[in-house]
Image (cartoon, rainbow, N blue to C red):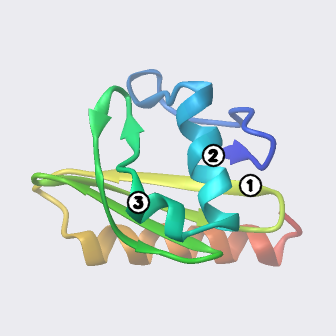
């Protein structure tokens, strides 16, 4: 989880995004088209944008991927590998973001 200012609120050590990476994603919520124009890099790996709008960003890298969902105060990041379907990761990330919205985050 990252605040809308890019500060990390919670996460795992092995899934830390560099400040420039999360700032790029956060800016992508304001201008989703920019994510299609230049492939985002996360933890040094290049990702292809498969979906982007003002509240949801889905990225893919071979069998890995990431889902970012924006709520009122935070961006929830959900990373997945070949053992999890992109649809399952999307549902999990959106359900958690909805929970956060409902409690004011």
Disc 3 element: helix
Q: How far apart are marks 3 and 1 (CA)?
A: 24 Å
What residue sits 56% from the left and 69% below the top?
32
What crowding class fits label 3: few (fewer than 14 Cα within 10 Å), some (14-19), or many (20 or more)?
few
The x, y position of residue 48, in whole percent, is 27, 57
Callouts 3 and 1 close, C-beta under 8 Å: no
What crowding class fits label 1: few (fewer than 14 Cα within 10 Å), some (14-19), or many (20 or more)?
many
Residue on which disc 1 sits: 74
Residue 53 in the image: above or below residue 37: below
Find residue 86 and name its label. Answer: none
- Frontmost residue, 18 versus 82: 18
- Frontmost residue, 38 versus 3: 38
Q: Distance between the residues labelled 1 and 2?
A: 6 Å
Find residue 1 and name its label. Answer: 2
Residue 69 in the image: above or below residue 60: below
What residue sits 41% from the left and 31% below the top?
15
Disc 1 element: strand
Quadrant position of the N terminus in the picture:
top right
Callouts 1 and 2 close, C-beta under 8 Å: yes
Q: Which quadrant would residue 100 be assigned to in this image?
A: bottom right
Residue on which disc 3 sits: 37
The x, y position of residue 54, in whole percent, is 65, 75
Determine whether, in the image, residue 82 is placed left or right of residue 64: left
């Amino acid at each position: 989880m990252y605040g809308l200012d890019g500060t990390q609120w919670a996460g795992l050590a092995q899934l830390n995004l560099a400040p420039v990476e999360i700032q790029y994603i956060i800016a992508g919520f304001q201008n989703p088209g920019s994510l299609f124009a230049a492939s985002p890099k996360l933890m040094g790996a290049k990702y292809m944008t498969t979906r982007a709008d003002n509240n949801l960003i889905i990225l893919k890298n071979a069998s890995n991927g990431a889902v970012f969902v924006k709520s009122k105060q935070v961006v929830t990041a959900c990373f997945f590998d070949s053992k999890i379907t992109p649809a399952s990761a999307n549902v999990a990330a959106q359900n958690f973001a909805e929970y956060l919205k409902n409690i004011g985050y």
